[in-house]
Amino acid sequence: MRKVLVVDDEPVIVNLLREFLTRKDYEVVTASNGIEALEKVKQEDPSVVLLDINMPGKNGLDVLKEIKAYNQNIGIIMVTALSDQAIGSDALRRGAFDYITKPFDLDYLEKVLWWKLQLIE
């Protein structure tokens, strides 16, 4: 089964994505901050991480860098409320597969996730 790690400090977003992805037959693991996300990456070995940028403590761009240093093959899709082009470009330069702003289109998110999984499987 395809495993996705959802990382966001907003429980509403985590629950929405968990329910949506579970209905689409993904195995979903969640984390509420960057430090927990790094632990889950090592414990759970997800194929893809949906990673919020703006979180307390360790932000998503730092977590992105650490995940890529740990395993280049994990696909990372940044999910954020910030619609800042510079941040999106920075995330892509650091190895993110895509950058999606909240509120997001779940159909588009599903397509991006599907495409990334096709590339890594």
Image: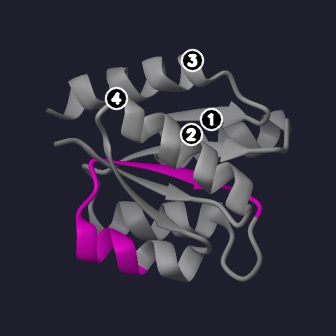
> Which of labels 2 and 1 is toward the front?
1
> Which of labels 1 and 3 is toward the front?
3
Label 4 crowding class (10 Å Cα cut-off): few <14, some 14-19, many 20+?
some
Which amino acid, mark 3? Tyr
Residue 77 visible in the displayed image: no
> Which of the two labelled residues, at mark 3 and mark 4, occupies the earlier sequence position?
3
Which amino acid, mark 2? Leu
Please, is residue 45 above or below residue 2 in the view?
A: below
> Which of labels 3 and 2 is toward the front?
3
Decide if residue 95 is on the left or right side of residue 28: right
Decide if residue 1 is on the left or right side of residue 63: left
Residue indicated by mark 2: 92
Residue indicated by mark 4: 116
Question: How far separated are the C-alphas under marks 2 and 1?
Answer: 7 Å
Give percent across and percent down for residue 49.
43, 51
Q: Which residue is drawn at 27% across and 31% down?
A: 117
Question: Magenta part of the protein: which range?
Answer: 39-54
Is 55 or 64 nearer to us in this picture? Answer: 55
Residue indicated by mark 3: 108
- Residue 50 is inside the magenta segment: yes
Residue 92 visible in the displayed image: yes
Is 78 or 33 nearer to us in this picture? Answer: 33
> Which of the two labelled residues, at mark 3 and mark 2, occupies the earlier sequence position?
2
Residue 22 quadrant: top left
Q: Which residue is drawn at 14% across and 32% down?
A: 121
